[in-house]
């Protein structure tokens, strides 16, 4: 990274950090917990075939969805398969596939630093702080990503067809 790029990143970080630090200290007791959004794990002997109709968003990403769905076990909200793929650096686009029906749903947001989620919970934490991520896009040498780790965290509840934002840091 060129020296002038580092200066720009550091200046941006200096402007953004005061608001994110206020969230970290004031909101820590109010963060949603996975146990508060428990989902019953539904035994799935074999995942349903994917529903991929021509002209849909799922059709547009069919190769990625097929590959990831085949390789990923049920990992979210009882009977869903959460998958992601890159949409830039750093950026992940998310899809959620109902393993009982094969229906593909898309998130209404992307993440920049992965997500946290559990098979037995409908809580989805985008861009969380820390190292325990389901996906990692934040490389050690990516200073922008490292500086913003956790600053864009948001909490969503899966409704069965879409994500509903339930909490986000105040800015």
Image: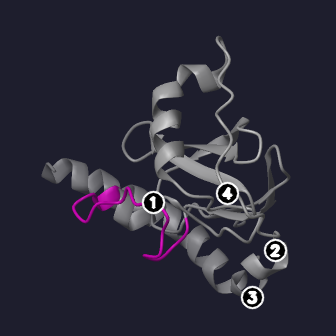
Task: Tell me where residue 69 appears, x and y as whole percent.
Answer: 54, 44
Residue 127 versus residue 48: which sits nearer the camera? Answer: 48
Q: Position of residue 2 (x, y in %)?
A: 14, 48
Residue shown at 45%/59% (left/top)? Answer: 135
Residue 44 sits above or below residue 67 on the image: below
**Mark with earlier residue (3, 1):** 3
**Please, what secondary structure does the residue beneath circle 2 have?**
loop
2 vs 3, front mark: 2
When asked about the image quadrant of residue 106, the answer is: top right
* Residue identifier under label 4: 45
| Residue depicted at 68% across the width and 41% down the height | 48
Q: CA distance from mark 3 to mark 4?
A: 39 Å
SS for dot 1: loop
Q: CA distance from mark 4 to mark 2?
A: 21 Å
Q: Circle 2: is it few (<14), some (14-19), or many (20+) Cα within 10 Å?
A: some
Determine which residue is flagged by label 3. Answer: 29
Q: Earlier in the sequence, mark 3 or mark 4?
A: 3
Mark nearest the camera among 4 and 1 is: 4
- Which label was assigned to residue 38? 2
Q: Earlier in the sequence, mark 4 or mark 2?
A: 2
Taking 155 as reference, is 3 above or below it?
A: above
- Asked if disc 4 and disc 1 are in contact, CB closer than 8 Å, the reply is no
Q: Is residue 120 left or right of residue 144?
A: right
- At x 73%, y 57%, the residue is 79
In the rendered structure, which segment of residues is drawn in magenta? 128-144
Indicate yes or no whether the magenta region holds residue 14.
no
Residue lying farthest to the left in this orientation? 2
Q: Earlier in the sequence, mark 4 or mark 1?
A: 4
Residues at marks 2 and 3, CA–CA distance in whole angstroms: 19 Å
């Amino acid at each position: 990274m060129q020296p002038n790029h580092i200066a720009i990143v550091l200046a941006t970080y200096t402007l953004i950090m005061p608001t994110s630090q206020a969230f970290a200290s004031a909101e820590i007791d109010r963060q949603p917990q996975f146990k508060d959004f428990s989902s019953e794990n539904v035994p799935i002997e074999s995942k349903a075939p994917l529903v991929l109709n021509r002209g849909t968003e799922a059709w547009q990403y069919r190769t990625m969805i097929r590959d990831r769905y085949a390789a990923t076990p049920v990992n979210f909200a009882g009977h869903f398969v959460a998958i992601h793929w890159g949409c830039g650096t750093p950026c992940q686009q998310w899809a959620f596939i109902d393993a009982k029906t094969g229906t593909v749903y898309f998130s209404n947001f992307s993440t920049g630093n992965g997500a946290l989620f559990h098979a037995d919970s409908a809580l989805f934490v985008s861009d969380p702080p820390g190292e325990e991520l389901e996906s990692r896009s934040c490389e050690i040498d990516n200073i922008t990503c490292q500086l913003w780790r956790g600053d864009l965290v948001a909490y969503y509840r899966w409704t069965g067809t879409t994500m509903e934002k339930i909490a986000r840091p105040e800015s």
